[in-house]
Amino acid sequence: MKELFSKDTWQEIFGSIQKNRTRTIITMIGVLWGIFIYITLAGAAKGLDNGFEKAFASISSNSLFIWGQYTSLPYAGYKARRGIQLKTTDVAIIKKRVPEIEFIAPRNVRGVFGSAGGNIIRGSKSGTYAIYGEYPEYIKIATTKVFDGGRFINQSDMDQSRKVCVIGERTVEELFDIDEDPIGEYIAINNISFKVIGVHKFVQGGGFGDDGDIYIPFVTFKDLFNTGENVGFFMMSAYDNVDVVKVEKEVKTVLKDIKDINPKDDEALGGFNLGKVFKDTANFVDGLSFLSLVVGIATILAGVIGIGNILLISVKERTKEIGIRRALGATPRQIRNQIITESVFLTILSGIIGIILGTLVLYGINVATEDLSDFPYTNPTVPLKFIFGALALMIILGTLIGTLPAQKAVSIKPIDALREE
Amino acid sequence: MQNFIKTYMINIKGLHKSYQMGSNSLHVLKGIDFEVKEGELVAIMGSSGSGKSTLLNIIGMLDNYDKGSYELDNVVIKNMDETKAANYRNKFLGFIFQSFNLINYKTALENVILPLYYQGVDRKTREAKALKYLDDVGLKNWATHMPNELSGGQKQRVAVARAMVAEPKVLLADELTGALDSKTSKEVMDLIQKINEKGKTILVVTHEEDIARMCKRIVRLKDGVIVEDKKITQKKAL
Ligand SMILES: Nc1ncnc2c1ncn2[C@@H]1O[C@H](COP(=O)(O)OP(=O)(O)OP(=O)(O)O)[C@@H](O)[C@H]1O
Ligand SMILES: [Mg+2]
């Protein structure tokens, strides 16, 4: 160990490395390439991870949707193929039996899923937009924001079945003049006059909404489209740190119970949650990181084996020199240590160069993708512990792989080594 | 009392050595009895294949022997492990080879330093010491030169300095003039004689009569045994 820090050891190593410059460089490229691949891939994976995180940051990842479909199994005297209709009365039961739910918003819609949208007229301008019947809870779950100066539907709108609406940015653009404040103005929805109380900014959240959607109170919607207590679908959010995938199952179980659906029927209720999408993405990125780890380690391994190979050749080439050294009094240990240190040194040196090059490439990619906001790729870094792990791996592998040629170097009798030409 | 105890620098009795080549065995040394006192300058002669180098390599602990006994400065040398052998070589023995055996990517000085490096001598001391020995062989000004920038005679003198730097008890030279012209050979032998005059025990393997005559004793080998061993009047090299 003492020898590791002595100037002489290093002089010996540099001497033999300098002597075999081409050989050394070719060898190093193997390991360099391995660690370079590893750093670039791992960094890219991390960059994607960060990118996805940023993209999902605006979405409440713990929200979920549930809707009714058709049963696929007969149950409790009902035949299969029965349509399941959600009702507003389900809300209280779900809230009571699934305490993980924080908010629940029954929703109805016209204008998506094949139904006709509302005909909107304002003065001489008109258009067709999707109309949503909403509970005030909706705004607490969705990523949608209402611009300053306006508001979302509130409880008294509901209580009094007010004819008020929140319209989208695009609707404002299409139905109003520039510089015109839509708040307080009136638009006609299917020939009934509604007062605009807010404009929403739509944020893409993996659902089906868009920036033209018009929200009106759920009860007003009921009167307008004659939907009674029917609910198109439920949108819910679970409390933080709750597994939404599990919550979705629980809600479905409750609904199956109150709607006489066979517990084994997976067709009767539809559901979607962002938690799953989130998890899938995370799994994908994890997979990518793992892949880069495997590929990186494999390449590093190949590189290190290359170093071992070259050292083995060099030990053969240098048999005579080793013989001379031993004639001059070098002990087997001193010879062995020199070759192992050479191996480790070469491995680490090429590793560090690989890390630097990999980092530069990552930096380049980062600069190039900075302005591409659609591209989910942010701040590609490789965690320090990975780098140190890679370095540790290289020290271990370098030592192991150096042992073979080192052993070979001392296994030859000094006299045989000297006789070598 | 002490004058009566006969001690030898090298004391070999009934030494046998065979080389195994597949199923064949080549009996090279067939019972060598050989003593060398401190301060002697011995030429080992014999025709090619007579076993001169084999004997020298055994004395130099580079090779092992099968039968008999060998004592170096009263230490029994037999079946020594490599680490111990390396330490003995380092402290007791200096080697000079026909082909110089300098490490070609090290300067003259670095080559001379090497035995001291393996001895663990600190940098300053060993550099100064190596320089002194280079000076002794007249190559102080060539210290920073690479072997390929030196003539054959200069290379061999660097090798002599390297063999001497660790102050060994015995200097072993195998055909040290074999690659040199007669003028350079004489210069190198002059160096050997001077070192011997200071009391160093030296063994020179050669097949050149005039080189052998520059020694003080000639031992002749033939078919693995010593056929002649005589003291001679030394001829000055220069
Ligand atoms: N490692 C070995 N394996 C097998 N045989 C060997 C080995 N080394 C030497 N020999 C044989 O042993 C015999 C003596 O060899 P050695 O080198 O001692 O002769 P030498 O007297 O030094 O000859 P030369 O004057 O040519 O150098 C030779 O026949 C040689 O072929
Ligand atoms: Mg020989």
Image: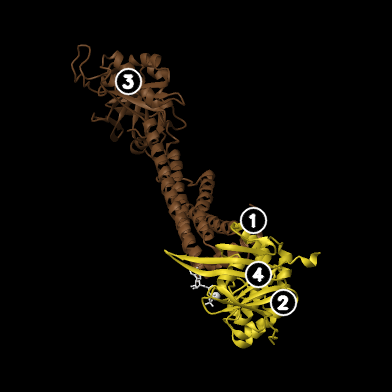
Chain colours: A brown, B yellow
Give the residue number, with chain letter if any, for mark 4: B94
Report, in whole angstroms, how far the alpha carbon at label 2 lies from the one at label 4. 13 Å
Which quarter of the picture shows residue B119? Answer: bottom right
Which quarter of the picture shows residue B73? Answer: bottom right
Image position of A289 with respect to B11: above or below: above
What residue is at 59 percent from the left and 86 percent from the top? Answer: B181
Q: Which element carries disc 1, helix, strand or loop?
A: helix
Q: Position of residue B17 (x, y in %)?
A: 54, 66
Residue A252: mark in rendering: 3
Report, in whole angstroms, how far the alpha carbon at label 3 lies from the one at label 1. 70 Å
Image position of B77 with respect to A396: above or below: below
Amino acid type shown at disc 1: Glu
Looking at the image, is mark 4 or mark 1 nearer the viewer? Answer: 4
Q: Quadrant of the C terminus of chain B?
A: bottom right
Report, in whole angstroms, how far the alpha carbon at label 4 lies from the one at label 1. 25 Å
**Between B142 and A365, which is closer to the camera in this rendering?**
B142
Q: Which element carries disc 2, helix, strand or loop?
A: helix
Give the residue number, with chain letter if any, for mark 1: A3
Q: Position of residue A20 (x, y in %)?
A: 52, 67
Amino acid type shown at disc 2: Asn
State yes or no: discs 2 and 1 in contact (Cβ < 8 Å): no
Question: Which residue reaches farthest top?
Answer: A77
State yes or no: discs 2 and 4 in contact (Cβ < 8 Å): no
Give the residue number, with chain letter if any, for mark 2: B196
Instruction: Check the residue under mark 2 and report the chain it is in.
Output: B
Q: Position of residue A95 (x, y in %)?
A: 39, 16
Q: Which element carries disc 3, helix, strand or loop?
A: helix
State yes or no: discs 3 and 1 in contact (Cβ < 8 Å): no
Residue A163: mark in rendering: none
